[in-house]
Image (cartoon, rainbow, N blue to C red):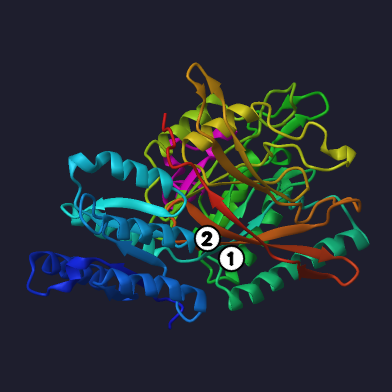
C-alpha cells in the first residue's frame, strides 16, 4: 500500500445490480473521483453484512480506510441494519460520509444522525447533487502534509564585539547549516518569521539580517516566496526610545529589510504576499500586513502587525482597527473544506505559563477581542514570538449572550522562543519550531506535529527535541462577520 494512497470503503446496496440506474450513477461518481485523484483506491461492498466484516477487520491492523462512504435508508425493512452500521463506524472512530437520497420526511432523522455522529461524520450528501460530493471528497483526499519553520526574535546585535560577536555569527551559521540538512530530509514549504529581527539599531541591523535570511532561503531551493515576515517592537525606528519619541518613519527599518531581501520592496508587496491593497507606508506599521496562500489555497496565512506606535506603550502589543478590518476582509468567507488558516503577529495573546519575572505584561492589550475575532473568522493556528518563551496552548471558550452561552469556540496558539536573542537559563533556551500539518479524514480536524529545536551553546549545535503531537479542531459553525 503506497503512503500516498487514499483508501475508501464504499458500502451501498445500489452496487448490487450492474443493470440498475443506481449502480450506473455510483459508477459515474466513482470514475470521476478516480480521474481527479489517481491515488484514490476503493473497496466496494454491496452487501451490508460484508460491510460489517470489512469494518470489523479494522482491528486487525492489516487494513485501514481513510474514509468510509455509506448509504442510509429510512423507512425500510433494513433501516435497523444501517443504524447498527453507523454505530460500528463510530465505535471504530473512523471518519465517514453519508451519500444518500434526501427526502423531506426524513429530515428529522438525518438531523439526529448529524448530531449523534458529529465527531466523525464529514457530511451528509444528497445523491442528486453528486458534483458537491465529488468536489469535497477530492479536497479531503488531496490535502497533503505541510512542513514549515517558525522563527522569531533574532535580535541580531550590531553593537557587540569580540567573543560575543563571534558566538552570534556561529549561532546563525549553524542555524543555516541545520536548516539545509533538514530541508534535504524533509522539504520545507515555507518560513514564518514573527518579528524582532533587530536588537538595538534596526536601521543598521536590517541589512545584516537580510543577508542572513537570504542565506536561509538559498539552502532551500532559493525561493523567496517561502519567506513571510511581520514586524516586532524592536524593529521600530525611534529617535528616543526612553522618552517615547518616534522617528518620522517608524517603519523604515522593515522597508530596508524587505528591499535588501527581495531587491525591491514594491515587488515584495505586489508579487510575494499581496500587500499592495494596504500600500507601503513607513509611517504606519499596519501597512506591513500580508496575505499568502500555499498548496492551492489549502494553507491560508495572514501576517499582521501587532506593534503599537503609541509612545505611552513604547512598541508594546495592540491590534489596530485598521488591521482588524484587514482580517475581516481577507477572511470574510467561510473557510473551505480542508483549508487551514494561520495567523501570525509578533506579540503573544496569552501570558507565558512561567514564573519568570520577564513575563509580566507581555500580551497584546486587546487580546480578548482578537481571540474572539480570529475564532469567528475561522483561524486554526495563531503563531507568535516576543516573550522568548515557547508554549502551545489549546483552549476553548464560550461567551454568554441573551440566549445563553455561545457554542464553544476553539483556538490553538503557539509561541516560539527567541532564535538568537537573550534566553534566560531558568525555563527557556534559544529555539525555534518545525511544524508539520497532517491531514485527517475529518473535515474539522488536522494533526499538528511540533518539533522544537534548541541551541546547545556548549556544543555550538542546534538539536531537535521530542516531538509534540496534537490535533486542531475548530467549531463547525464559525460565524463570519
Q: Pointer 1 and pointer 2: residues touching (CB < 8 Å)?
A: yes
* Of 28 and 186, the residue lying toward us: 28
Residue assigned mark 2 = 226
The x and y percentages for residue 122 are: 38, 53
The x and y percentages for residue 159 are: 85, 50
Specify the segment rendered in magenta. 265-291
Among the two numbered marks 1 and 2 on one chain, the one whose residue lies closer to the N terminus: 1
Q: Is residue 107 left or right of residue 301?
A: left
Q: Residues within 10 Å of mark 2 (few under 14, many from 20)?
A: some
Identify the residue at image location x=77%, y=24%. 244
The x and y percentages for residue 100 are: 23, 55
Q: Secondary structure at mark 2?
A: helix
Residue assigned mark 1 = 217
- Seen from this angle, which residue lies furthest front? 77
Q: Residues within 10 Å of mark 1 (few under 14, many from 20)?
A: many
Q: Secondary structure at mark 1?
A: helix
Is 175 one of the magenta-colored residues?
Answer: no
Amino acid at each position: 500500500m503506497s503512503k500516498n494512497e487514499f483508501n475508501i470503503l464504499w458500502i451501498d446496496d445500489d452496487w448490487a445490480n450492474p443493470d440498475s440506474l443506481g449502480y450506473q450513477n455510483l459508477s459515474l461518481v466513482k470514475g470521476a473521483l478516480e480521474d481527479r485523484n489517481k491515488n484514490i483506491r476503493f473497496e466496494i461492498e454491496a452487501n451490508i453484512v460484508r460491510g460489517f466484516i470489512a469494518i470489523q477487520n479494522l482491528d486487525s491492523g492489516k487494513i485501514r480506510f481513510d474514509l468510509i462512504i455509506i448509504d442510509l435508508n429510512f423507512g425500510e425493512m433494513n433501516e435497523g441494519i444501517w443504524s447498527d452500521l453507523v454505530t460500528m463506524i463510530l465505535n471504530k472512530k473512523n471518519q465517514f460520509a453519508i451519500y444518500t437520497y434526501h427526502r423531506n420526511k426524513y429530515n428529522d432523522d438525518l438531523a439526529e444522525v448529524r448530531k449523534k455522529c458529529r465527531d466523525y461524520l464529514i457530511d451528509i450528501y444528497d445523491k442528486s447533487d453528486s458534483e458537491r460530493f465529488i468536489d469535497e471528497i477530492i479536497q479531503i483526499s488531496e490535502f497533503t502534509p505541510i512542513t514549515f519553520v517558525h522563527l522569531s526574535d533574532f535580535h541580531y546585535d550590531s553593537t557587540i564585539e569580540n567573543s560575543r560577536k563571534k558566538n552570534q555569527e556561529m549561532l546563525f551559521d549553524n542555524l543555516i547549516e541545520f536548516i539545509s540538512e533538514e530541508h534535504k530530509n524533509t522539504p520545507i514549504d515555507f518560513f514564518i518569521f514573527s518579528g524582532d529581527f533587530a536588537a538595538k539599531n534596526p536601521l543598521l541591523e536590517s541589512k545584516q539580517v537580510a543577508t542572513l535570511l537570504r542565506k536561509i532561503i538559498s539552502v532551500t531551493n532559493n525561493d523567496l516566496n517561502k519567506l513571510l515576515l511581520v514586524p516586532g517592537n524592536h524593529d521600530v525606528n525611534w529617535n528616543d526610545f526612553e522618552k517615547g519619541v518616534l522617528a518620522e518613519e517608524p517603519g523604515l527599518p522593515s522597508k530596508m529589510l524587505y528591499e535588501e531581501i527581495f531587491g525591491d520592496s514594491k515587488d515584495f508587496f505586489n508579487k510575494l504576499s499581496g500587500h499592495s491593497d494596504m500600500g507601503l507606508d513607513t509611517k504606519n506599521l499596519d501597512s506591513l500586513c500580508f496575505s499568502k496562500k500555499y498548496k492551492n489555497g489549502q494553507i491560508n496565512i495572514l501576517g499582521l502587525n501587532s506593534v503599537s506606535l503609541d509612545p505611552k506603550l513604547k512598541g508594546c502589543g495592540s491590534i489596530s482597527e485598521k488591521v482588524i478590518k484587514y482580517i475581516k476582509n481577507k477572511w470574510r468567507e467561510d473557510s473551505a473544506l480542508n483549508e487551514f488558516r494561520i495567523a501570525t503577529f509578533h506579540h503573544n495573546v496569552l501570558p507565558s505559563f512561567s514564573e519568570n519575572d520577564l513575563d509580566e505584561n507581555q500580551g497584546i492589550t486587546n487580546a480578548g477581542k482578537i481571540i474572539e475575532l480570529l475564532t469567528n473568522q475561522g483561524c486554526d493556528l495563531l503563531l507568535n514570538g516576543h516573550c522568548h518563551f515557547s508554549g502551545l496552548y489549546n483552549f476553548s471558550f464560550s461567551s454568554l449572550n441573551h440566549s445563553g452561552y455561545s457554542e464553544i469556540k476553539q483556538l490553538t496558539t503557539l509561541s516560539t522562543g527567541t532564535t538568537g536573542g537573550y534566553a534566560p537559563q531558568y525555563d527557556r533556551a534559544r529555539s525555534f519550531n518545525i511544524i508539520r500539518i497532517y491531514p485527517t479524514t475529518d473535515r474539522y480536524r488536522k494533526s499538528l506535529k511540533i518539533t522544537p529545536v534548541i541551541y546547545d551553546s556548549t556544543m555550538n549545535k542546534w538539536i531537535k527535541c521530542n516531538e509534540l503531537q496534537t490535533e486542531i479542531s475548530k467549531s463547525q459553525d464559525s460565524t463570519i462577520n
